[in-house]
Amino acid sequence: MSSGRSCEPKEQAACGLAFSFQIKQATAPESAAIIQRFAYRANGQLADDRWKIHKFGGSSLADADCFARVAGLMIERPGERVGVVVSAMGGMTDALLNLASQAERDDSAFETGLNAIGERYAQTAKALIDGDALVQVLDAWGQDAEDIRDVLKAIALVRSAPQRSRDVVAGYGEIWSARLLAALIGKLAPERGGTWIDARQVITVHQTELGPTVLWEESRQNFRDVVPADFTGIAVMTGFIASDETGLQTTLGRNGSDYSAAIFAALSSACELSIWTDVDGVMSADPNRVPEARVIDQLTYNEAMELAYFGAKVIHPQTLGPVIDNDIPVFIRNSRNPEHPGSRIAADAALADSIKGITAIGDMALVNLEGAGMIGVPGTADRLFASLKNAGVSVTLISQASSEHSICIAVPRVLAERARQVISDAFAEELASGQIHSVDVTDSQSIVAVVGDGMAGTPGIAARFFGTLGRAGINVRAIAQGSSERNISAVVDSDEATRALRAAHSGFYLSAKTVSIGLIGPGTVGSTLLRQIEKQHARLENQFNLDLRVRGIARSREMLLGDRRIDLTGWQTAFDGGAVDLDLAAFEAHVNPDHLPHAIMIDCTASEFIASQYTEWLSRGIHVITPNKKAFSGSFESYRALQAAADEGSAHYFYETTVGAALPIITTLCDLIQTGDEVHSVQGIFSGTLAYLFNVYDGSRPFSDIVREARENGFTEPDPRDDLSGMDVARKLTILARELGEPIEIGDFPVQNLVPEGLRDCSIDEFLERLPEYDGEIDALYRDAVKQDKRLRYVARFDAGGNASVGLEAVDTDHPFSNINLTDNIVQFKSDRYSANPLVVQGPGAGPEVTAAGVFADLLRLANYLSTGAGYV
């Protein structure tokens, strides 16, 4: 323990260091009493007298500002016995190891590299300390640099850098950090700081195949020898480095400073260990891949180890061993945001959530050993894993079917070919005889794992995990789960890993279920829908954890794209300044990025071209919602291709509003079919436009005036002839007939066209201008119906025999079709269950508000299915 340069034990007296303390040999009860003692402090409060250990990594010690921040944090921390374990400055260890590599190549550039390291260290030191303290720190660095040069010259002489030499060179980074931070704290708080501990004098390890193992008794004795029992203040401790049984320097491996901190916490019987990083704590997922990831407040030791093993970078799995054995809680904190409470890792962490986090390991490959000759043969797995052990291949995941027909393992991608070769060699005889069929490698894989102690004994976790991945269109190649039920792992293609992470993260309600939306056609219905989504967005996110994220809006010639989302409160204004030329492929790519699990295209146009894109979208896993009837009433061959594409892409299409706006007409028909009812006939008024026209028309005003009025109120298509032609109704009847399994086509049944033949090919303006010329035709039909005490209605009919028709009819005044309001649609289902008294669905079937509401309802139905799998689609 030193207030200046650390010395070898034999040099300690000559150095004049503060080693005046002696700790007597204590019995176990006496030691326990010392560890557990409490004392009243000056403020009169009872305080725990045990050590508090803090660890700071390279990112927290990157430059002078970082050192100053760390020193300030430690001086302000409560408690009189504080240990600060430090890593090398950010990038320092790599720079030192690079010197050894240069020397191994007999590259004299290592001199330049060492000088650059010295210049960086000197500039940092000069910004923090001055006077004698600065002279001592820089003199010590100069002596260390000479020692490093001697080692590097020896490496260059033999053109070889043995591991021990690399350890010696790499370990100086932590020494320099400890020396400088101790000097800074000594300057700022001389009554508490100025002391640093060289871990080589304390931690003794034995190197094994599994890495360094701490020799605890020897290390505890060293700690008692170096640190006085009555020490109070802040002691800075070197991370990463240690000594072996012979007293020679070694390291604890990469991320070894975390391990050093845990060891010092155990040796000092600390009451807590805080690991300071550049994030607010252990995250529920990698925030670079899942922006909605949140800090996990509490974790058990086991949960933290699982997350660390599977890629959570804030803590190394090995770190937790010493603290688990000594029941020391660990806090993960942010040195740049010290006010945040961070994450607490302990044995008694609350099990509030069944799943604590979702994590992933990339750059993996699957190796599959398969063959009928393996079934029931003992020792197959032993031979497999023995061959991998001898080749130095670490296995990350194992999956084997109960049939024993195959064993699948996941290994790092760079080792996949070596694994395949050694397995092939081990089973060469069986491969030659055909008992083993193959040893295959599937490259570019990732392992996605869900972790949580609360999973144990909770039914449905695996179903939710794999169901969530399935609904996101992600194929799972292999799965694994231990008997502890703490972890479920799935192997997926690497290019789908981010999508899988996001889907699972939202699937377990760790973040909002995010749906990426692209809307095409922000006209009357489309703009109304955007307004409805904007109005309900906050409520849906707060109450249902649903984030409807509109990321693209497209018009006929231009499009608006939002990086994260489009602000729907001012999208029209944004269009004026931020729109670009429409590129449908780019629009699709933006709406369906790899990092978002679910993408939906909402088509609010009447465009046949846009409808023709559905098949491609569905095949690529993009869901479709639309009131556009073109795709579902086009050729039957195209209709079947649409269904096949949806199956291929595991995607869904919702089109309730193609028939009755927001009325549940298709849903009702599907319910009848799904529940086994036999539907005999469907008839109704399927056009809100034509219902409006013939409800309003009473012979007192020209029919052409009512058509123009309906168009201005948004009750017709942009071109009223799309309604008057009867084709809109014919398409709706075709959609319903196909739901009943009838392969019907437009043209297979009669459709009465109410557009005068002379106006069918002219422009919209000319049509509206000349329509009054034909008012007499409708007037004559109307007066003829009145004479029969009937009313004109435009009716569509279809029966189980395949008979269909669409046309203007005169219906009795007491018929349900005669007693509808304005834009009402009405449909009548006659079935086995509803024979004497047919089932009737009636309500407004046109208008932007109700149509947009119907599309919105489809959107929520689809989002609910994607979230929970509930409902049929």
Image: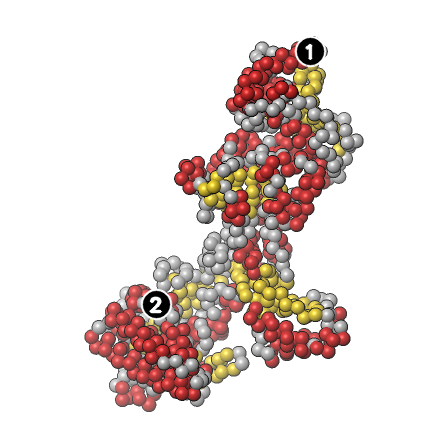
Q: Residue at x 57, y 66 (%)?
A: 364
Pointer 1: residues within 10 angstroms few (<14), some, or many (20+)? some
Q: Nearer the viewer, mark 2 or mark 1?
A: 1
Q: Residue at x 62, y 19 (%)?
A: 758
Residue 550 visible to an observer of this rendering? no
Coloring basis for residues: secondary structure
- Quadrant in which residue 340 is drawn: bottom left
- Tell me the quadrant of the picture where the N terminus can be found: bottom left
Residue 815 visible to an observer of this rendering? yes
Nearer the observer, 732 or 771: 771
- Tell me the quadrant of the picture where the C terminus can be found: top right
Pointer 2: residues within 10 angstroms few (<14), some, or many (20+)? some
Q: Residue at x 27, y 77 (%)?
A: 137
In the rendered image, residue 613, in percent from the top left (x then y), is placed at: 60, 42
2 and 1 marks in contact (CB < 8 Å)? no
- Quadrant in which residue 816 is drawn: top right
Residue type pointed to by label 2? Ala
Residue type pointed to by label 1? Asp
| N-terminal label among 2 and 1 | 2
- Which numbered dot is residue 62? 2
In the rendered image, residue 381, in percent from the top left (x then y), is placed at: 67, 74
Figure disc tally? 2
In the displayed image of the protein, which residue is found farthest to the bottom? 10
Q: Left of 193 or right of it: where is 87?
A: right
Q: CA distance from mark 2 to mark 1?
A: 92 Å
Q: Secondary structure at mark 1?
A: helix
In the rendered image, residue 288, in percent from the top left (x then y), is placed at: 46, 58
In the displayed structure, 254 sits above or below 669; it is: below
Q: Residue at x 61, y 76 (%)?
A: 388
Nearer the observer, 89 or 261: 89
Which residue is under mark 1?
784
In the displayed image of the protein, which residue is found farthest to the right? 801
